[in-house]
Each structure stands twice: as structure tokens, then as C-alpha cells.
Image: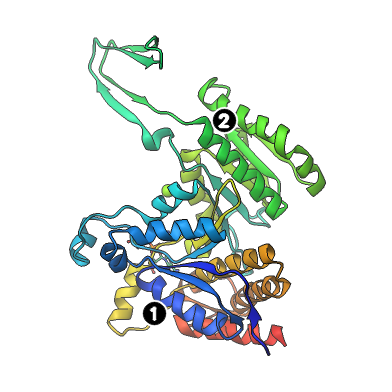
Amino acid sequence: MAKIRMTTPLVEMDGDEMTRIIWKMIKDILITPYVDLKTEYYDLGLENRNATDDQVTVASAEATKKYGVAVKCATITPNAARMTEYNLKEMWKSPNGTIRAILDGTVFRSPITVKGITPYIPTWKKPITIARHAYGDVYKNTEMIVEAGSKAELLVTKADGTTETALIHDFKGNGIIQGMHNLDASISSFARACFNYALDLKQDIWFATKDTISKKYDHTFKDIFQEIFDSEYKEKFEQAGIEYFYTLIDDAVARVVRSEGGYIWACKNYDGDVMSDMIATAFGSLAMMTSVLVSPDGIYEYEAAHGTVQRHYYKHLKGEETSTNSVATLFAWTGALRKRGELDGIAELCDFADKLEKAAVKTIEDGIMTGDLYLLSTLENKQKVNTEQFLLAVNENLRASLV
Ligand code: NAP
Ligand code: MG
């Protein structure tokens, strides 16, 4: 069989530890035998980030802007322990944070659902995708501890030097205050990224805030979403047969629990932080969550939601067998290949991505799975395999589906 040709390279961002090992296995076993893989390679492994003063991360994000689609391996975000382990010049920032800042994107996370791993919420039949706004609010706050007898006020000094103040509280006893902000531009980007992604997936999008209580802050989120929807997306949504739906956050939570799934749930920064962990856990496993960063101008960066699986890597280094789940990393590759195929009009590439995903799901549904899923699966004929055996089993199913 001739290999599938690509016209535009994918931006390939390699990473660290166990996911770096899996990365190579996925390419060798499941991709390069079938696809004449074109990538522009960036090594975001911590050693190379340190050697290049983290310029490689910036370069990979710039390349993503140029080509439009990237696939990223999990990477170490340095902390004190990593400083000594890797003899780092600096505590380099999180690559995901750097890339997100350059692409100005929104992160969408969806679970990969398989038979045998049942969500804790039995009504959920289809995946729920969380879209989390990744700028501002409590993550860029200013806080103070306030003593009894203090008066706290908000003070804004405008460009012309005039000021506006508002009383926060007259403190009779000790207390606390917090100031936070967001930007119209960032909220607008978030709204566009959400609407574009909903059109992409042909799924409804829900958005919720607490605008009845926060009449200026949260209400601005609601207004910006509505204005952008009405002026830019209403007709496209009608044509696609999908809906934009706004409700209060507490009503949204109740509806989500009662729903069947199959939609995108857009959340403010904090809500998204909390709710994405709830969704991931309720669907079964972090190792089955995919993640894609979408910029408002339609640039895509695909990755797994989990980290570098450090504990398994240390076992691997000691020569011990590992049973690490490669599914989310594999779906990062298939997501990127499919998007490249769509953008370049290569139907074969999209078809290959679909078949590879189906082969992975079939493998698990036939009872062959890594240790993490083995613990969760309710299948009777289940069998635990090692990291490589799982990919080889996927390859058997893939080969069968390609002939
Ligand atoms: P982690 O790599 O997600 O792993 C946490 C635990 O979850 C693992 O020890 C393992 O549990 C389980 N797990 C996660 N993914 C799995 C998989 N694919 N297969 C099987 N089990 C899996 O998080 P971490 O250990 O806290 O972080 C390790 C490094 O990853 C850190 O340096 C962190 O900075 C980085 N990180 C990167 C990203 C990213 O690049 N997007 C995201 C998060 C963390 P058991 O040990 O019980 O088997
Ligand atoms: Mg969290």
C-alpha cells in the first residue's frame, strides 16, 4: 500500500519522560508505516529548552502560527526539584503557558469514551467538552488581609487623571479583600474560539456565569458572547443546525448532570479549572482526556491532558516493564493529522485518522488495555498489556481496517 502523502508539515513538539518514549513508539508503530509524515520538529524536552534558553518553545509557537496545526507531547513544568535534576539555568515557565500566550488560545478538553468504562453519571452517553477561558480573574488577582477599622475601596485612575472610587467594605472586624480583572479583548477571543470550535464539532455550545449577582463583571462576559454571536455566528449556527445557549452557572451544573452529553461547555477560568477535573474524573480517567488549544484565528495545537507520567518513566529507566496509556497522546496525533487533512483537502489523511482512532477504541473494547483502564473496566474478558503491546494490538486492528 502506498503511503499517504502530506502537503503541509505538522508542527511537532516533542516532550519529556514517559510521554517522550510513547511519542516515538506511536510514530514508529502507527504513523510512519502508513503516512509519508511531514513535520517541522521542535524538541521541547527540558534539556533542549534549557540549552536554547527556552527559545525553542517560542519558535515552535511561531511555527504553529505559520502552518496552523501542531501536535505537542507532554512537557515538564520545572519546579525546585527539576532545577537540580536537570541542572537548569532558570526555572523556565510552563511551555503550555508560553504557547497559549503567543497563540491567544482557548483550551478544549474532551474525554475519549469506550465501552467497559462507564461514566459515574449514568445518563452521560456522549462526551462533554469543556472550554476553559485561560486569562485573568482569580488567577491574576491582588489580595490583602485587612485589619479591623479599615475601609477598603476600589480606586480607578483614568487616562485623563480623573478617578472613580467605590466602597468595598467598612471593616468592623478583621477580614480579607481581593481585586481581579479581565479584558474585553481576551473575552472576545474566548467567545470566537468557542463559537468556531462548536461549528467545527457541529455541537451546541453552553456558556454560564453568575451574571445575576455580578452585574458588571460576569454580565460583561454574557454581553460580549451575545454580541459576537448575534453579529458573527447566528446564521452559521442556523445553517449547521446547532445552538448557542446561555444560562446561570448553577443552572448549567444541574443541566449538565441531567444531560446525555454531546455538547461544549464554555466556562470562565475558575469554573473551567474545577469543572474540567470533575468531568475528567466522572468520565473515568485523565489518561483518556484529549486537549486542543484553538486560537481565535483558527490555529490548532493538539495534546493529551495528562503530564509526562514521571513515576512510570523512572520504572522504565530501571528497565522495568510499564503499562502506560498512550490513547490521549495517540488522539493528539490523529486530531492533528485530521485537521491537516481537512485544511489541505487530503481526504485519505482524515480517513486514516478516523480509522486509527477506531482501531484504538476497538482494542480497548475487545479487552486489551493498559493497567490504568484494567482497574476501571467492567469487561469480563479484559487483559492487561504493557505500553508497547497495546500499540502493537492497535496496529493489528488498524491494518485490518485499512485493507
Ligand atoms: P501526570 O504525568 O499526569 O501523572 C499523574 C499520575 O496519573 C501518574 O503517576 C499515573 O498514575 C496517572 N497517569 C497519568 N497519565 C497516565 C497515562 N497516560 N497512563 C497511565 N497512567 C497515567 O502528572 P504528574 O506526575 O503530576 O506530572 C508529571 C510531570 O508532567 C510534571 O513535571 C508536570 O510539570 C508535567 N505536566 C505536564 C503537562 C503538559 O505538558 N500538558 C500537564 C500536566 C503535568 P499512577 O502513577 O498511579 O500509575
Ligand atoms: Mg485544576
Q: Quadrant of residue 315?
A: bottom left
Circle nearer the N terminus (2, 1): 2
Q: Which residue has dot 2 on it?
A: 221
Residue name at image x 56 percent, y 80 percent: 31
Residue 133 in the image: state x and y as whole percent.
51, 42
Residue name at image x 52 percent, y 81 percent: 391
Residue 332 in the image: state x and y as whole percent.
54, 66
Q: Is residue 335 left or right of residue 183?
A: right
Residue name at image x 41 percent, y 71 percent: 19
- Category of crowding for the residue at label 2, using alpha-carbon neighbours closer than 10 angstroms: few (below 14), some (14–19), many (at least 20): many
Which amino acid, mark 1?
Answer: Thr
Residue 111 in the image: state x and y as whole percent.
57, 59
The outermost residue toward the bottom is 1
Residue 322 disc label:
1
Q: Is residue 42 left or right of residue 245?
A: left
Q: Is any atom of residue 376 visible in this view?
A: no
Q: Quadrant of residue 55?
A: bottom left
Q: Is residue 325 left or right of residue 322?
A: right
Q: Is residue 312 above or below residue 290?
A: below
Nearer to me, 268 or 373:
268
Which amino acid, mark 2?
Answer: Phe
Identify the image's colour scheme: rainbow, by chain, secondary structure or one colour. rainbow
Nearer to me, 340 or 148:
340
Residue 320 in the image: state x and y as whole percent.
32, 83
Q: Is residue 13 above or below residue 202?
A: below
Q: CA–CA distance between discs 2 and 1? A: 45 Å
Q: Is residue 109 left or right of residue 399?
A: left
